[in-house]
Image (spheres, grey):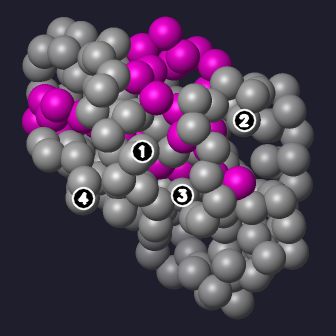
Amino acid sequence: MEQVAAAVRATGPRLGGVRLVVVDGPSGSGKSTYAARLSALLPDSLLISTDDFATWDDPVGWWPRLERGVFHPLGSGRPGRYRRTRWVNGVAEPGDWVEVPVPTTLLIEGVSSGRRSITPALSALIWCELPDPVERLERAVARDGAASRAELVRWQAFESGWYPVDGAATRASITVTV
């Protein structure tokens, strides 16, 4: 992990004065755990999860909110903000506003965080790999609860179509197994 942190620190900023690092990969592959550990090794870093945006019914269409609220302001050297998704009894609704100060390194972790459209602004794309879909599903169910199993199965079916088209794994500068 320290080697990855050193590699990230050695990259230059490409989102204005901010190093943008994404940790992408399918659900249950260990992205959240890996990104939290990496963030702890990067001084003045800020971690945002795509879970703050995505919902079961909108796995990737929320991206413009992240661009407008976070990427555009930070790229101009200004703080950003976004409205977090809040879950109440399994239903997504608008939650609190989150203020985003200008960090040295911004880590975005989550499904579709390394999408093709953001590539020019990326300092690093880290792909979390766990090839066994059954193990990934069981990890995700352990994290989100048994009641989420049907949604997670549907989510993983979506991912199996998303990733081959977007190609994040093939554009990754670093691949890890967590």
Residue 156 placed where, x, y %?
81, 58
User: In the figure, residue 112 lies in which quadrant?
Assistant: top right
Mark 2 vs 1, N-terminal side: 1
In primary-sequence order, the first of circles 3 and 2 is 3
Q: Residue at x 64, y 19 (%)?
A: 116
Give the residue number, with chain letter if any, for mark 1.
Answer: 4
Quarter of the picture holding the N terminus: bottom left
Amino acid marked by disc 2: Ala
Eye-nearest disc, 2 or 1: 1
**Is residue 94 something one can see in this rendering?**
no
| Distance from Cα at disc 3 to Cα at disc 2 | 13 Å
Disc 3 versus disc 1: nearer the observer? 1
Residue that badge 2 annotates: 169
Question: Which of pointers 3 and 4 lies earlier in the amino acid sequence?
Answer: 3
- Type of the residue with mark 4: Ala
Per the image, label 4 sits on a secondary structure element best described as helix
Label 4 crowd (10 A; few <14 / some 14-19 / many >=20): few
Dot placed on the residue nearer the N-terminal end, 4 or 1: 1
Q: Which residue is the site of mark 3?
A: 31
Crowd rating for badge 1 (residues with CA inside 10 Å; few <14, some 14–19, many 20+): some
> Which stretch is magenta?
100-129
- Marks 3/4: CA–CA distance: 14 Å
Say what secondary structure mark 2 lies in. helix
Question: Going 51% across and 81% down the picture, which residue do you hit?
Answer: 89
Residue 40: which numbered mark, if any? 4
Q: Give how far across and how far down residue 67 sits, in percent.
A: 40, 23
Instruction: Tell me the mark number nearer the camera, choosing from 3 and 4.
Output: 4
Q: Looking at numbered disc 3 in the image, what kind of residue is underneath it?
A: Lys
Q: Are marks 4 and 2 in contact (CB under 8 Å)?
A: no
